[in-house]
Amino acid sequence: SAVISQKPSRDICQRGTSLTIQCQVDSQVTMMFWYRQQPGQSLTLIATANQGSEATYESGFVIDKFPISRPNLTFSTLTVSNMSPEDSSIYLCSLSGTRVDEQFFGPGTRLTVL
Amino acid sequence: GNSVTQMEGPVTLSEEAFLTINCTYTATGYPSLFWYVQYPGEGLQLLLKATKADDKGSNKGFEATYRKETTSFHLEKGSVQVSDSAVYFCALRYNFNKFYFGSGTKLNVKP
């Protein structure tokens, strides 16, 4: 199984600022995903990040708000821009394993916006 | 479109009680179905999965059967333990490893 780490594990930020979340994987993967888990709710897919191409965003999410970088096959970042309290969530990166239907999730970054 | 509906929690049980968490889905095609578990303070972990109709996924005493006729994937365990206290998410996979999750069901098991 893949080992996924995220930084920071949690943060408290002020309204209007931006935070960049890092996701590091111990193996090379083609597709990485970013999810959001709002308080008391389920996970929602934000975008898919492929190395060497622009991220693909799901309905309701835009690049200006959630810019994503994917500089290589083991690393990705998600930035939450111009934050508001509604952005308070857990943000998780995820990747597909080598076997069909295998999916792994990072430990998450708990973000609180004041 | 795709959707997953699971029973609302929290569910509170005594140790050794029988557990059922209902999950139904709507999907185009034939998705794979999953149960993920999130223990307090930890990330999501795969609990079990089923990739086609009538498949039964099982792990750690938990079971779920992929029922195409009722579009369901209910999670069951015959005898829960305090250590099973967690949030359980039903999910389906669509469109090349994108997942659609249910709202989660919190399980509290009391000694």
Image: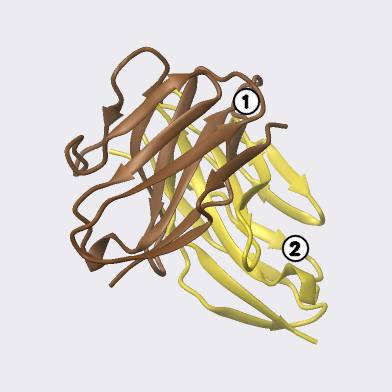
Quadrant for the C terminus of chain B, please. Answer: bottom right
Q: Position of residue A50 (x, y in %)?
A: 40, 19
- Name which residue lies at 48% across and 32% down: B31
Q: Nearer the viewer, residue B71 or B83?
A: B83
Q: Amino acid under label 1?
A: Gly
Horizontal placement of A69 versus B34: left or right? left
Instruction: Write down the residue under mark 1.
Output: A97
The answer to whether A114 appears left or right of B42 in the picture is left
Horizontally, is B72 left or right of B17 in the view?
left
Position of the N terminus of chain B by quadrant: top left
Query: Marks 1 and 2, Cα distance to the nearest angstrom?
Result: 27 Å
Mark 1: secondary structure = loop
Q: Nearer the viewer, residue A17 or A97?
A: A17
Q: Which chain is yellow?
A: B
Q: Residue at x 46, y 71 (%)?
A: B8
Is residue A28 placed above or below B101 in the rendered structure? above
Return the residue nearer the eye: B87 or B91.
B87
Dot 2 corresponds to which residue? B77
* Picture layout, residue A109 above or below residue B66: below
What chain is the brown one?
A
Q: Residue at x 59, y 55 (%)?
A: B74
